[in-house]
Amino acid sequence: MIQSVAFIGLGAMGYRMAAHLPKHFKQVYVWNRNFAKAEQHAAEYPTQAVPLEQAVQADVIFSCLPTSQDVEALITPLTLKAGSIWVDCTSGVPESARKLASLLKTQQVDFLDAPVSGQTIGAENATLTFMVGGNVTAFERALPAMQAMGKLIQHVGESGAGFAVKAVNNMLMAVNLCAVAEGFSTLKAHGVSLNAALECINASSGKSAVTESVFPQRVLNRQFPLTFALSLLAKDTGIAQDLVREARLSTPVIGLTHSLIQAANSLAEEPGDFSTAIKMYESWSKITLE
Amino acid sequence: MIQSVAFIGLGAMGYRMAAHLPKHFKQVYVWNRNFAKAEQHAAEYPTQAVPLEQAVQADVIFSCLPTSQDVEALITPLTLKAGSIWVDCTSGVPESARKLASLLKTQQVDFLDAPVSGQTIGAENATLTFMVGGNVTAFERALPAMQAMGKLIQHVGESGAGFAVKAVNNMLMAVNLCAVAEGFSTLKAHGVSLNAALECINASSGKSAVTESVFPQRVLNRQFPLTFALSLLAKDTGIAQDLVREARLSTPVIGLTHSLIQAANSLAEEPGDFSTAIKMYESWSKITLE
Amino acid sequence: MIQSVAFIGLGAMGYRMAAHLPKHFKQVYVWNRNFAKAEQHAAEYPTQAVPLEQAVQADVIFSCLPTSQDVEALITPLTLKAGSIWVDCTSGVPESARKLASLLKTQQVDFLDAPVSGQTIGAENATLTFMVGGNVTAFERALPAMQAMGKLIQHVGESGAGFAVKAVNNMLMAVNLCAVAEGFSTLKAHGVSLNAALECINASSGKSAVTESVFPQRVLNRQFPLTFALSLLAKDTGIAQDLVREARLSTPVIGLTHSLIQAANSLAEEPGDFSTAIKMYESWSKITLE
Amino acid sequence: MIQSVAFIGLGAMGYRMAAHLPKHFKQVYVWNRNFAKAEQHAAEYPTQAVPLEQAVQADVIFSCLPTSQDVEALITPLTLKAGSIWVDCTSGVPESARKLASLLKTQQVDFLDAPVSGQTIGAENATLTFMVGGNVTAFERALPAMQAMGKLIQHVGESGAGFAVKAVNNMLMAVNLCAVAEGFSTLKAHGVSLNAALECINASSGKSAVTESVFPQRVLNRQFPLTFALSLLAKDTGIAQDLVREARLSTPVIGLTHSLIQAANSLAEEPGDFSTAIKMYESWSKITLE
């Protein structure tokens, strides 16, 4: 039975995720590099802001950091409690998951790669999806803690499988981002109403999360709210591309999409939402997607 | 007020679509090149199988044929009734729509390009989506007839706009077909459970009609039921590609996808469902998507 | 025997090409839309600047204009001399060649599509390559006139074949322009000397006209002399792309290259040499190819 | 002054390369995993077939193996002579060159990555190109030994730079292989004579080593002589692709070409020459490139 849970990394996602834990668990530790954020969390919710060394003595430790490199740097010097489970919600690198799983095994700690989807609204409403790789028994033991924050909690394979699914998911989103930008530029060039086209496509076989939410909520209204950075999407499409390379596969659309997202990210002059990738297409077509 | 309606082309879609018309209109003519099919329809439903020349005297004439070339060949020699409206549900070529609209104008007949989506099940349940290009007044006059067969009836622009939206819709579906095949081959190569991955992605930003229906209903179960031929998808991605060329745009993902669908179609030894395009990827990866 | 030759279109290529004709033929007419250019030519060389109607009474008429549209507009209203041969050196559209060949046949005039390569230096030295489509007998009759300006004069097929070969040639050059820009950015990112790399590649299997001349003479020295406009290259890659479409082929590299050249051309703020296409890559990589 | 030279790896290239060394150096050791090959060499040329441990006591040691993995496996357990230079002519991985350079430095041995181009004919005639990465002083000391076998011996940068240039060279060749296959299928579909087209292109801006040698000598004559395996080309395009990834660049044409070569290699049922990659295109187009 899980008595104590820790949450490390209180960014836009982590801050909201950790807020649900006290409803289900007696002891909830929070920690953040900028520690003021942890103290703010403990003031707002019944959590305890404690030093990292203390936090990681919990039965289940969640982490949610920008990259796998950050997670490795954090975990490597730590001494953990035998029998505990580390659940990493970062959108990370499968190879790093395998490495950390091996490393923690020497301390009799399980490592699960458990990236989430659902954005800040899903974190807020505890309706996130967890795609989890690693030992099944550990998965089952950590399940109640994940259920406190998510709706669909899915074991997808061995160590690294969770990160792999997340990378492929984000790649598929990126493919649609590019393809919809291309298709809608073409439609606008031919005088078609984009909102009318969107309505038709969302009732048809061409629909995707990009046509259902990204385009109406971020692009066509020209808002581009910064909730998931383009640079992070470029990192994720790169992870997907690396999976392809390791498997020696031929994936032309994935490869091209990574090139395009990489180019769009290089062109961005300041940090922007992933949806600003479409501005590269606008610079080519001189057509504004609105 | 619409008194008579005709339906020309009783294929898998047309046969089911025409069946709804007698519920709303007194006189419903049906015609099919293989006329036995028309007679069968008139036996099964309260429609009248009549010669083409008579059918096209209806107030509203629907056509649903394989290609725009077929529609042009059919319409060109006909004499129509002034004031009637021709509604073409073929997945056709925008340029052909403009040509036919001009041609029929000389007979005081309106031509609407009104391709549909929703597949045979949508035709059966009268829940199709109509994406319609052409004169707005004609659209409004023909609306009741389309409503008899569809749910979302959307005017999207001038002549050709309906065909353009359909072509882009099918292109977006093709992009997802390729990208999901690539992504899922990669996941399987890394030992990830495809069904578990699918469940996660369908709750996340990577979802599309391909992950929600095509892969579970056609690919992963290895059924590939022939309801929409790969050769027709190749025709449609070609129409989208031509729209790009006319507009002098740069659309790398669309261009590549057309190449891939074209290659997959060339490789197919016999007519197959559009979803069999993924078999080209399987021949590359030696990985079966199941 | 050819007694009289005309040259229509005295641009950078035509002006130099026409200069060789008086060495071989008694009567050489020149004409240019901006007629002052024709008069300048007649002052500099033993040619005659005459009205268009007179020029086109020559036995062999050469034209060298920016596009096939210009050639069609020029030819359509003209009355020509039966038995004469029109040799069009424009980098044109194969379909237009077939159309003009048909049209001129009604006046008993042969039309050869005969685009040239070799640039202004080849025009200057009469060492151009002519790739010629059309009737073989007409080709043989016009041969001496082409030999006055070129070195390799090659019949490649029926009407349109000359334009097709030129379009594919320019497409292959465009492919190399993109690929070398990509490869050399990569080498520079890894600290490799580009000039040393160029020397190795030019002695190896990766060499092309782009590594042998375009990069050393235009890019690495940052000169980008405007001798062949990027917009014309984009036109030519478009012609190649259209040939692919007509033949219903799958050509992923050609398709992608056309997209890239199209994008680079859209981004160019002012008319520039084709080699400036590499600046799009530089904007992506922040690496200057020098 | 170099007294003794060794050559390790007597494949199609190495056997011919080593044959030139006795003309310039007193002691030439040869070694091959299948030692009979070394003995055969020593019978045919004034070289000495000796055990590996003895061979690597030479002043300059050449190696020429299929992959960097083979070289690492070979070198790692060896004890070398301080002050000697190891010159690796394998088409290898830049990262491996840096690793081996570090490793050998601990034994006071220099490692140069020095892949060659020029094929067996160049090996036979001692006209190879060496593209060399590593310490400049070591390069200059080893220069006479390389000059015994090559014509252009070029230092291109630090450790790994030689392998990088070779990988990019082979990638550029692969790009042309694909693009020429696409372009020539298109020309043939339009009835153009491929030999005539080739002659024109080889006198024009679209020429490359592929149009000048690969197509006339391997493809159009349907010989496909196995001198450089498609699987090795796929390895090399993968190395180029990895260089792109490390540098975080956007290289759409390189990425797509690697996908295509990878697919063609997967499809090949038995080991074949790199030029057989065009058969994938032929299966798509049903057009034989002859």
Image: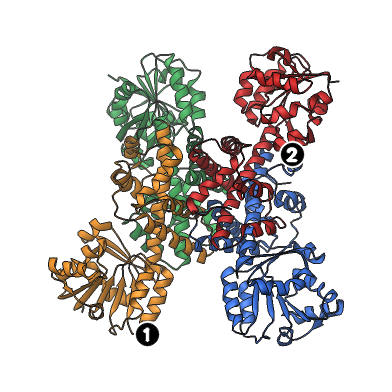
Chain colours: A orange, B green, C red, D blue
Mark 1, residue position: A106
- Give whichever of A102, D125 is nearer the camera: D125
- The answer to whether residue A73 shows anywhere in this view is yes
Q: Quadrant of residue A74?
A: bottom left
Neighbour class for label 1 at 10 Å: few (<14), some, many (≥20)? few
| Quadrant location, the C terminus of chain B | bottom left
Label 2 lies in what chain?
D
- Give whichever of C182, B84 is nearer the camera: C182
- Evaluate if marks 2 and 1 touch, with contact meaning CB atoms under 8 Å apart: no
Label 1 lies in what chain?
A
Q: Secondary structure at mark 1?
A: loop
**On screen, residue A287 above or below A132:** above
- What amino acid is labelled 2 in the image? Ser
**Of marks 2 and 1, the one in the foreground:** 1
In percent of the image, x 17 and y 70: which residue is there? Answer: A39
Instruction: Name the spot of residue B95 as percent of width and height, x first.
Output: 48, 27
Q: Quadrant of residue C195?
A: bottom right
- The answer to whether residue C113 shows anywhere in this view is no
Instruction: Name the spot of residue B9 as percent of width and height, x first.
Output: 44, 30
Q: Secondary structure at mark 2?
A: loop
- What amino acid is labelled 1 in the image? Thr
**Gap in angstroms between the C-alphas marked 2 and 1:** 68 Å
Instruction: Name the spot of residue A91 as percent of width and height, x first.
Output: 35, 64
Instruction: Name the spot of residue A164 as percent of width and height, x first.
Output: 41, 65
**On screen, residue B289 above or below B78:** below
Mark 2, residue position: D193
In percent of the image, x 74 and y 80: which residue is there? Answer: D34
- Left or right, A69 with respect to A85, comes to right
- Give whichever of C44, C183 is nearer the camera: C44
Count of numbered tags: 2
Neighbour class for label 2 at 10 Å: few (<14), some, many (≥20)? some
